[in-house]
Structures are given as structure tokens and as C-alpha cells.
Image: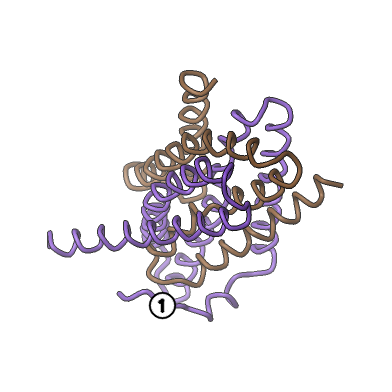
Chain colours: A purple, B brown
Amino acid sequence: MAVHLDLPALAKTRWYEYALRFLFGGAITVLTGILAKRYGPVFGGLFLAFPAIFPASATLIDKHEREKKQNAGIPHTIRGRQAAALDARGAAEGSIALVFFALFVWKLAPVWNAAVTLFAALFVWFALAVLIWRIRKHLRLKSL
Amino acid sequence: MQLIFRFIAGGLIVSVFAALGGILKPKSFAGLFGSAPSVALATLALTILANGKLYAARETRSMIAGAIALWLYARVTIWLIMRFNLRAALASASAIAAWLICAIGAWLLVLR
């Protein structure tokens, strides 16, 4: 399947599901700041890669897939769990790219302009994440 | 005041990445956004403003260990779902223990 946007999926997400992600994201960012202030940047920095989005996203994917099957008259399904596991596989690949995001900022933030460093690091993360995903997909297709 | 600003910035950036992950297909590609540097972007931008670039660089050195722990977290989540047939909510919440053990273990053994 080619990568594409599924815009109607935005409407399927309920307002409280967006609110939950906002609250969780805000809370983790505040917690990271508090930990860095209390225990120093070396400890607080660990939480920059805390799984902030994943639990809520995986739960919603599982729920939406189950609801889809139930609406189609299939009460018991493992489809939701399989979809959440696929999402987790993507997160594992993205986390490898996240190591390089951190490495990039660590080495270049002291010498480059801050905004340029963060945008360039974001680009590095995205490019590497897509590359890893494509390699993995290519290897999987070859092994079929 | 700084905490409120931090909360709003973090919430907004995490929500944008989560929404992106929600509308992209296939699911394995959308999953990449589950480990997007959302908290890092919000935190680092504010940290650089408040504490300077060197302080932020020290945080990102530790973030490397956090990102390795995030990889382990995602693999443990997959294992819990596939091996024990757990719901995604329970598997992803339980796997946070793996993230904490790996990240804090790295801090105790290497970073501290």
C-alpha cells in the first residue's frame, strides 16, 4: 500500500480523544521540565524520548478497528490488536531515527543557531524514519 | 507561568504529531509518528530560551538513551500484544515499565 492521507479519519476521532492527547502531551512536557530542574538536565533529558503519544494512539487504533468490525457484524476480532501492533512496529522504526535526532542536536546545538538546529534535526528524524520504513518494507517484500 | 506555557506548547506539538499519525496510511508508516520528537521539540525550544544551548545539548545526550529505551518499549508492546493477546491500552501501559528500567538503568550505569 502506498503512503497516503486519510482525511475522513480526522472526523472519526472524537473531541475528548484530541483533548486526551493534548493533556498527556502537555503533562509530559511539564514533567520533563520539572525533572530537569529538580535532578538536572542529564536525568531530565531521558524523558525527551518518553512514549508520550504512543499509548493513547495505540488505544484509539485498537478501539476504532474493533468498532469498525462490530459495525460490520463481527463481534469478536483480533484486528484492533493487529493494527496496534503494526503501529508499534512503526514506532520502533521511528525511535531509531530519534537516536539520530538527539545525536544531531547534542553535537550541533552548541555551535549552530538554535532554531536552525531544531528544524534540521526534525528533518533528519523524518528522512531517516522514512528510509528505515522503506528498507524494512522492501526487505519484507523480497522475503515473500 | 513558565509551566503553563510549557504545558500548552507540549500539548499542541504532541497533538499535531498525533493527528498526523491518525490520518496517514498504512498503519506501519503512521506508527513512525508514535516516536516523533514532539516532547523534545517543545522542551528543547523552551530550554534553549531559558537555560541556553549548552544545557539543552546536555539534555539531548541523555535523550539518546531515552530513544533506545523507546525502541525497547515499542518491541515489548508488540510482544505483549502478539504473545499474550493483550489489548493495546494494557500492553502499551505495561510496557512503560520496560522504558523506565532501560532509561533509568542507562542513567545509573552510564550517564550519571
In-front residue for pair A93/A70: A93
Check the image and name the residue furthest to the front: A111
How far across and how far down the image is residue B40, in percent?
59, 48
Q: Residue at x 69, y 32 (%)?
A: A35
Residue B46 versus residue B23 in the image, above or below: above
Can residue A58 be seen here? The reply is no
Q: Classify residue B71 as left or right of residue A138.
A: right
A137 left or right, relative to A60: left
Location of mark 1 (residue): A4
On the image, which quarter does residue A137 sit in?
Answer: bottom left
**Does residue B97 appear anywhere in the picture?**
yes
In percent of the image, x 43 and y 59: which residue is there?
B31
Q: Position of residue A13 (x, y in %)?
A: 60, 70
In this view, which residue lies farthest toward the right? B1
Question: From what the image shows, is residue B21 above or below residue B111?
Answer: below
Image position, residue B107 (x, y; %): 52, 24
Q: Is residue B105 above or below residue B14?
A: above
Q: Residue at x 42, y 61 (%)?
A: A80
How many marks do you count on the picture?
Answer: 1
Q: Amino acid at mark 1?
A: His
Q: Nearer the viewer, residue B52 or A4?
A: B52
Pick out the residue farthest to the bottom: A8
Element at label 1: strand
Callout 1: chain: A
Label 1: how many Cα within 10 Å (few below 14, some 14–19, many 20+):
few
Quarter of the image where the C terminus of chain B is located:
top right
The quarter of the picture where residue B14 lies is bottom right
Q: Where residue B41 sits in the image (x, y, percent)? A: 61, 52
